[in-house]
Amino acid sequence: MFTTQTGPQPADLADVRATNLAVVLRFVRAHAPCSRADIAASTGLNKATVSSLVAELLDRRLVRETGLAENRIGRPATMLVVDGAPYAAIGIEVSIDELTVVAVDLAGTELLSWRRAFDGSSGSPGRAVSAIAALANRAVNRVGNQAREVLGLTVAVPGLVDADGTVRLATTLGWRDLPLGTDLRRALRDPAFEVAVENDANLAALAEYRHGPYAGTANLVHLTGGAGLGAGVVADGRLLRGGRGFAGELGHVPVEPGGPHCPCGRHGCLEAVAGIPALIRRALPDAAEDGPISDFAPEVERIRTKARRGDRPTLDALADTGRYLGRGVALLANLVNPEVVLLGGYFATLAPWLLPAAETELLAGTLAPEAGGARLLASALGTGAAAAGGAARTLETVDAGRLPPPGPGWAARQEAGSAAKASRKSPTRSSTAPPGAEPEPTSGPTSAGPEAPATAGPQPTGPSRQPAGQH
């Protein structure tokens, strides 16, 4: 679960209620369909509190009632599921050869998934911002036409991104100190929704942790396989970000002294010997005869076709790349001891030929027996994992308590309910009571009141980090 706090913070009743709303919403997401009684029993919140919180979530259209459950002890219960139909979250992934946009509703249902050609290696940053903003506007308009409110847009970039959304360095794109977050907000005319920028590997790891086949694995790594090579690392259920959010740059760890030149300016980096451009040069020596490659997909498909045919030079090139990848993964295994390392992007496409050599190198290069239990596998999320992670980031912030505002009638209904409750609790004198007699004390619940925080039950789950632009 994302967190935007770095230490103990004072809390008022509004904070407590927001926390409890998030607890209930997360429980419904994880256990739907479920009843109010299920929520109360599992979270430690009393039934009156749960009823009040569910009423507000219903009003905000974050959950909905889905009918009665008959097969339970006692009378049938009204069941709840996540709704969020009026809302959407959007993620955009920027790579050297394409832009990918994904939009989902708050239940995680995909609303759209588009890919657009993009030449990130030769265009200026200004043109790139315009292209990203144009695609974002199209996605916003599409979900807007479905009567959905956009709650957040997160852009995934292959590079170092600081807390305010400035891309400090993206070597494959040639960007340095680009205020992408600020520029996008300006290009989108300061939208009402949040615009954030984040590292692509981090967001891909979030997508794996939330939606992938290994969702919930507490120690997980996603390796990006595009023009660059980065690692999104989840350690003990939290995204490993480092002091300034720049952790995970595995591609720029030197693994081959005196090796080929890397776009970062050094030589022998893992990206320079194991990245997709390096593999294409190794497997398809003729690929660059017509100039720099701006679209990797056709070349990767050529490599896969030749590998299927058993072409020996192609198989050797894939094995060499696999060995370098295994060397890099062994470094991770020794440092953070992941349970699962997932090859993403184009690596996943070529995984049948990369994995054997990579696994051998991983076992040889890891101190712990059996690579410390690390499994090296292909990601099932495809080349748009970071875009999906960008959309998931907004869902995480909602689950953490940043909820859309309630409907316009909520405050009035709350006020009316409070007045009615106060009226019911006002002491009344019996017509037979003697003058001056004190009213009988009213009985009431002895458990925590409606604004008491949950003290037990489900805890926030997922990578905990300070998202870019959220400090």
Image: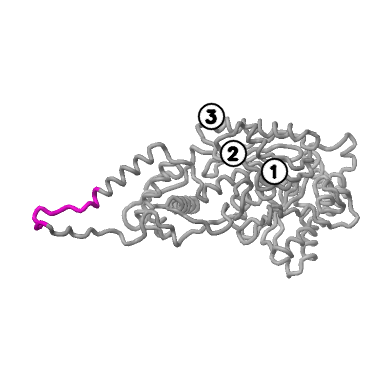
Q: Which residue is mark 3?
A: 145
Question: Of marks 2 and 1, which one's residue comes earlier in the chain?
Answer: 2
Question: Of marks 2 and 3, which one's residue comes earlier in the chain?
Answer: 2
Is 444 positioned to the left or the right of 214 in the image? left
Above-or-below relation of 209 to 115:
below
Whether tag 3 and tag 1 are in contact, CB under 8 A, the answer is no
C-alpha separation, residue under disc 2 versus residue under disc 1: 23 Å
Residue, x 88% and y 50% (percent of image)?
A: 312
Residue, x 79% and y 55% (percent of image)?
A: 325
Quadrant showing the N terminus: bottom right
At numbered mark 3, what does the secondary structure look like: helix, strand or loop? helix
Q: Quick one: 107 or 50, which is closer to the camera?
A: 50
Above-or-below relation of 251 to 93:
below
Question: Of marks 3 and 1, which one's residue comes earlier in the chain?
Answer: 3
Disc sitting over residue 383 in the figure: none
C-alpha separation, residue under disc 2 versus residue under disc 3: 13 Å
Amino acid type for the residue under numbered disc 3: Asn
Residue, x 87% and y 57% (percent of image)?
A: 256
Q: Quadrant of residue 96?
A: top right
Q: Which residue is mark 2?
A: 103
Whether tag 2 and tag 3 are in contact, CB under 8 A, the answer is no
The region drawn magenta spans: 423-435
Is 435 positioned to the left or the right of 456 in the image? left
Q: Which residue is mark 1?
A: 166
| Neighbourhood count class around disc 1 (C-alpha, 10 Å): few under 14, some 14–19, many 20 upward | many
